[in-house]
Image: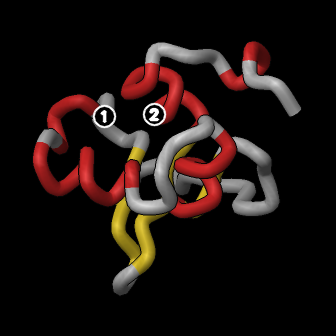
Amino acid sequence: MAKKLKLDINTEELIGSREASLEWGKQKDYVRTIYNKYPQRFPEGTIRKFGKQLIVTREGMEAVTGVKRSDLKK
């Protein structure tokens, strides 16, 4: 029997695509554009579409932009 995966969706590791784009200093549709043109740039498991909403992880944003979240100016 497979072990059930428990996922905490109240984590700051999951970010809506628009919010993530703006947080990394990009245009509001940056994540959606990159995902549509170059989905392979996101490491497996770092982005997912729920209905019309894209959810991306911190790791995914760091991989695509090359900028760590901790290096962003708040």
Give the left or right position of residue 14, taking residue 59 as reference.
right
- Would residue 35 be found to the left or right of residue 1 on screen? left
Q: Is residue 39 above or below residue 58?
A: below
**What residue does disc 2 label?**
60
**Quadrant containing the C terminus in the rendered view:** top right
Q: Secondary structure at mark 1?
A: loop
Instruction: Tell me what residue is drawn at x 14 percent, y 40 percent.
Output: 38
Check if mark 2's residue and mark 1's residue have beta carbons within 8 Å: yes
- From the image, tell me which residue sits under label 1: 42
Where is residue 25 shown, x and y percent of the image?
Answer: 61, 38
From this viewpoint, which residue is outermost toward the bottom? 51
Q: Amino acid at mark 2?
A: Gly
Of labels 2 and 1, earlier in sequence is 1
Is 22 or 42 nearer to us in this picture? Answer: 22
Q: Within the image, what quadrant is residue 15 found in? A: bottom right
Residue 50 point in image, percent of width and height = 40, 77
The amino acid pointed to by label 1 is Phe
Mark 1, Cα crowd under 10 Å, few <14 / some 14-19 / many 20+, is many
Residue placed most toward the observer, 52 or 26: 26
CA neighbours of label 2 inside 10 A, class few (<14), some (14 to 19), many (20+)? many
Residue at left 47%, top 52%? 27
Secondary element under disc 2, as helix, strand or loop, is helix
Please give the name of the residue rendered at 53% of the width and 49% of the height, measured from the top-left corner. 21
Q: Residue at x 63, y 17 (%)?
A: 68
